[in-house]
Amino acid sequence: MKKVLSIVFFLMTTLCTFGQVFTDDLHVTSGAGRTTDYTQKEVELKRVAGSGSRYTVTFKKLAPMAYKTFGDFVIDGVMSTVDAETGVTTFATSATEGKWVNVTSTAAIGGVTEGSKSTLTSFTATLSADKSKFVAELNFMTMGSDVSVVFGKQIDTAINTLTTADDNTYVEIYNLGGVRIQHLQRGINIVRTANGKVKKLLVK
């Protein structure tokens, strides 16, 4: 029995040490509202040995700009909590920076070099109870611009509705010229809501 338990413990430790790589769609919004969709992008979730609930999340071959892969974006100090009822694991971090590794030659366009850091403004993620589906959202700064990344879920970028300004769940605001602004302005604004949808918003 002890031998069986030892083998199980070894396998669990091995899995936790090497982590799990997820392959899914990636949606990037950067600069003045430019959006790019990628397929077959990879994110690695790796438990820090001996830490229990602490992880490192690595976005492999991240491309904040169309056709310009910068490298791997690593977020350390990611903590996990498991919902006892659903079994879903939620991840968050208090880290304020992410680090670039395996940097490519095109990364110089964004001022990125091997080991350089970008300011991390937000990060959240979930792992399904069966450990097969990883969904992550993060925002960071590069070239003085916000970059929004969504991994593992579809994003509806169609702008096909016009509503009045009674919905305050927006997370990004742009004017009709595609320039990001801090607050709603009179006329038509383009907003991205917390659920990832993009729509026109009329402020009277």
Image: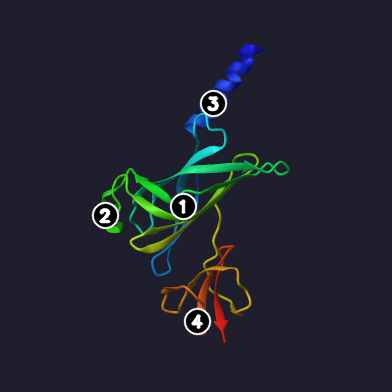
Mark 2 residue type? Ala
The residues bearing labels 3 and 2 have C-alpha atoms spaced at a distance of 38 Å
In the picture, measured across the screen, residue 204 lies left or right of residue 101, that is: right
In the picture, measured across the screen, residue 66 lies left or right of residue 16, that is: left
State which tag comes first along the sequence, 1 or 3: 3
132 or 140, which is in the foreground?
Answer: 140
Q: Which residue is mark 1?
A: 39
Q: Which residue is mark 3?
A: 13
Residue 73 position within the rendered picture, expressed as x and y whole percent measured from the top left = 40, 47
The residues bearing labels 1 and 3 have C-alpha atoms spaced at a distance of 31 Å
For residue 38, above or below residue 157: above
Residue 118 position within the rendered picture, expressed as x and y whole percent measured from the top left = 37, 53
**Mark 1 Cα-neighbour bin, 10 Å: few <14, some 14–19, many ≥20:** few
What colour scheme does the image use? rainbow
State which tag comes first along the sequence, 4 or 1: 1
Whether label 4 touches label 1, CB < 8 Å: no
State which tag comes first along the sequence, 4 or 2: 2
Residue 115 position within the rendered picture, expressed as x and y whole percent measured from the top left = 32, 44
The residues bearing labels 4 and 2 have C-alpha atoms spaced at a distance of 35 Å
Mark 3 residue type? Thr
Dot 3 lies on which element? Answer: helix
Dot 1 lies on which element? Answer: strand
Closer to the eye: label 4 or 1: 4
Q: Which residue is mark 2?
A: 108
Closer to the eye: label 4 or 2: 4
Find residue 185 and name its label: 4
**Mark 3 Cα-neighbour bin, 10 Å: few <14, some 14–19, many ≥20:** some
Residue at point 50%, 49% (across, down): 94
